[in-house]
Image (cartoon, rainbow, N blue to C red):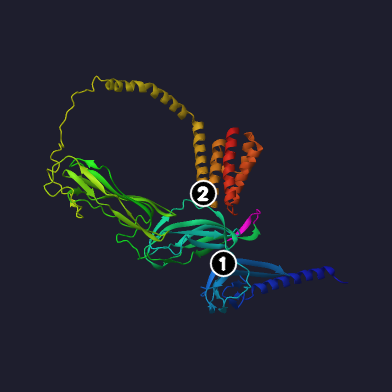
Amino acid sequence: MVDYKAIIKLTLVLTVFLSSFLMMAQGNDAVTFEMKLSKPKLGLNERLRVDFVMNRDGDNFNPPDFEGFKVIMGPSQSISSSWINGVRSYSKSYSYTLSPTAKGKFTIKQATIVIGGETYKSLASEVEVTAAVDKPSDQMTADDVADENLHLVAEISKTDPFLNEAITVIYKLYVSPNISVSNYQPLDNPTYNNFWSQDIKVSALSAQNGTYKGKPYRYVILKRVVLYPQKSGKLDIEPLSLDVTVDVPTGRRDFFGQRMYAQTNKTVSAGNRTINVKPLPLADQPSDFNGAVGDFDFAVTTSKKSLNATESLQATVEVNGKGNLKLFKLPELELPSSLEVYEPEFTEGVRTTLAGMQGKVSNQYTIVPSFRGKYPIAPLSFSFFNPTTEKYTTLTSDEIVINVLEGPLSSDSNSDASTNSSKQSVVASKNQFNFIKLTPNLTSRSISYFFGSTSFYLWLLCPLLLIPLAIVFRKKRDAIVGDVAGNKIRRANKLARKYLSAAKKQLGNKDSFYVALERALHNYLKAKLKIETSDFSKDKIVELLHKKEIEKSTIQGFIALLENCEAARYSPFSDVQMQADYATASEVISLMDKQL
C-alpha cells in the first residue's frame, strides 16, 4: 500500500532543499561591475549615454573624469530587483549623458565602487568622435531643447557711426514659449574699450512678446548702454555672457497632476560685434573745432551791461542741445585786459538717455571792472559736426559792450581800446575794497525784553494747557495695557501681516514664497483660535473653525491654501499660481476676521 503522507512529506522537504540551494547559489554569484556605452562611435553633435551597472548594491561610487566630454545630465540612479522561479535578480546602475567637446578618439577611464568591503573597477572603453552628422540619432535632451529655444542678442542702433556719435546697445534675452527661465547670472560683462559708455538702468525685468528669426518668442531687456566711440576704424564690442537656469517640460506629470520639468544650466553669449567708426571729415573743418559732435545751440550772455566800477557782473558761455556734451571743451571768453576776471565756474546739466546725451554745459565768469568806460567783449565762435547732415556748423555770438558808469578813470590808454587776449588775473589786496565798510558796528534803536512780554506769558501757561492732554493720554494707554487678549490678537495680526508682506516680496521664488505664506496662516490661527503650534492639523483646524461658525467655503479656502503650501515643496508652481494664492490668502483672512 502506497504511503501518500510520506510521499507528500518527502516532496515538501525536496522543495525546501532545492529553494535553499538556488538561493545559496544566487547568493554565491560573482560580483559584477561593468561600464556600458550606448555607442562606440558618434558625431560631434550627438550624445553618448554611459551606464555603470552592478549586480550588488555598493557604496562610494567614483566616476571617471570623462576627458573629452561634457556631462550634460547625470548621474541618475536606477535599481531593479525581482524574483523569477525562486531566483532573485538585482541590478543597480549609475547613468550619465555626455556631449563630446572635440573630434578624435577618447578613452573613458575606469570607475570604482566598494561592494561588500572590496573595491571593484570597471574596464576602460574607447569612443570615437567624428564630424557632426546631419541627423543625430539620439533623442533630444533638456540641454538640446535649451540650445534651440534660448538666445541672447545685442541689438545695436547703428553699426557705422561717426567718431563721437552716440550709438545704443540693447541686450535682449529671447525665450521660446516651449521653455521657461527661472534664474540667470552674468558671467562676463563687456568693458567697452575705446568707447565712452553710460549704462541706462533697467528698472524692472518685464517680459514682452516678439519674434526671433520669424518665430514667436518672449524677450526681456537685460542691459542698455549708450556708447560714444573715441577712435575711428573697426572697434569690437565684447560679448555679454550669462549662465541661465532653464526649465524644460518633460511631458510627464507628478502625483498631483502638475507638469514635471527638467532643469539645466545653459551658457549664452551675445557674440562679438564690430562697429566701423567713420573719422570726421577733414575738408572744411573749422580751425576752432574741438571735437563737439551733435546738434547744438551756442550763446554768450551777461547778467548786466551797465554797472559802476568795483561792482561785479556774470558772463556765461553756454552750449545746449544733443550730442557729446561731456566730451569737449567750451571756448574761452576773451576780455579786455583792464577787466578783472575770476576763474570760470563750470556747470553741467546733462542727462543720458537711449538717444544719447541731452542738456547743457556752461562756464560762468565773474567780472569786476576797475575803471569807468566802455569795454567790448569780442564775439566768440563755437564749431561742431552734425552727423545727421554730415557737415560742420559754426555759431558766433554777438559783441557785448560793458558800460561802466561811475569810477576812477584809467591812467592807461582809452577804455575803448581793442580787446586783448591776455586776461588780468585777480590779485587780492588789503585795500581792494577800501571804500566799502565791512564792519558797520550797527545797533538797534529799540530794545525789547523777554520778561513781561506776550511770549513770556504764553510759555508760562503752556505746561498748564498740557495737563488735560496728559490725563487723556494716560487713560487711553491704561486701557490699551489692560486689554491683554486684545493686545495678543493685535500682535498676532501684525505678525501675520508681516509674513504676508514677506510672502509678497518673494513672489516668483516658489520655496521662499510658500514658506512665508504658511507661517502667516499659522500665526493668524494662533491668534484667533488661541491654540499652540503642536495642535495644528487639518482636522483640528476644520473642527475649531466649525465651532467658531465659520462659513464652509471660507474653511475650504483656508485648507486649500495650506495644501498648496505643502504641495509646493514637491511640485513646480508658476508665478500666476503664486499670485493667485497670495490674493486668496488676503481674501480668506479678511473673511475670517469678519466672522470670528
Q: Percent from the top left, x then y, of residue 177?
A: 60, 58
On the image, which quarter does residue 143 sit in?
bottom right
What's the CA distance linking mark 1 and mark 2?
Answer: 30 Å
Image quarter of residue 23: bottom right
Q: Secondary structure at mark 2?
A: loop
* Numbered badge on residue 74: 1
Where is residue 542? Give x, y as percent: 63, 40
Residue situated in front as seen by the camera: 320 or 511: 320
Q: Which residues are magenta?
A: 254-262
Q: Is residue 490 left or right of residue 342?
A: right
Residue type highlighted by circle 2: Gln
Magenta-span inclusion, residue 260: yes
Report the side of 11 relative to 543 (left or right). Answer: right
Residue bearing the label numbered 2: 506
Marks 1 and 2, the one that precedes in the sequence? 1
Q: Is residue 540 visible?
A: no
**Residue occupying the point 21% across, 40% down:** 307
- Considering depth in this image, is 442 or 183 the residue closer to the camera? 442
Picture quarter with the C terminus: top right
